[in-house]
Image: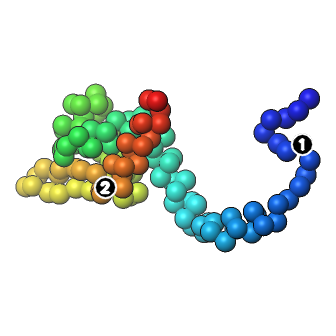
Amino acid sequence: MVEFDRCGINCIHEEAVKAVKEVLFSEDVAISLAELFKALGDPTRVKILFSLMTRELCVCDISAVIGASESAVSHQLKILRTLRLVKYRRDGKILYYSLADDHVEKLFIQGLEHVTE
């Protein structure tokens, strides 16, 4: 029986391996990228990011949009902030959250397009 996820023989293509190794990122970058994708693996965080892609919102607004407690939203926002996916600005006692930069929106849009095709 043929395994479709493996080669039929063991054969290393030295030139291909060398070319990829020359551009392969560091272990630290791999870990950071994995953490980013891990953050996107939570439906609540995905809903928060989509909400913030639409417009700047405070914790109370996000809570009302996604139907989660303010405490749960705050916890998820802390994770997203740590990963530099969201930022906030203070207006008196209210914190308004938004996406950290255009990269986050582009990543989100591409992911959304991928799953809805």
Q: Is residue 78 visible?
A: no
Name which residue lies at 44% across and 29% down.
116
Residue for badge 1 = 8
Residue at the spot 78% in from the left edge and 39% down from the top edge: 5
Q: Which of 60 and 29 is in front in this view?
A: 29
Q: Where is residue 108 in the image (x, y as percent from the top left)?
A: 39, 44
Secondary structure type for disc 2 = helix
Instruction: Tell me the amino acid under the disc marked 1.
Output: Gly
Neighbor class of circle 1 (other Cα within 10 Å; few <14, some 14-19, many 20+) is: few
Left or right, 82 with respect to 69, comes to right
Q: Which residue is drawn at 33% across and 48% down?
A: 105
The reply to whether residue 79 is visible in this rendering is yes
The spot of residue 92 in percent (x, y) is 7, 55
Residue, disc 2 = 102
Looking at the rendering, in which quadrant would you find the N terminus? Answer: top right
For the residues bearing labels 1 and 2, Cβ distance under 8 angstroms: no
Identified at 82% across, 42% down, the residue is: 6
Say whether disc 1 or disc 2 marks the residue closer to the N-terminus. Answer: 1
Q: Which of 81 and 24 is in front in this view?
A: 24
**Of all residues shown, which one is farthest toward the left?**
92
Tag 2: amino acid = Asp
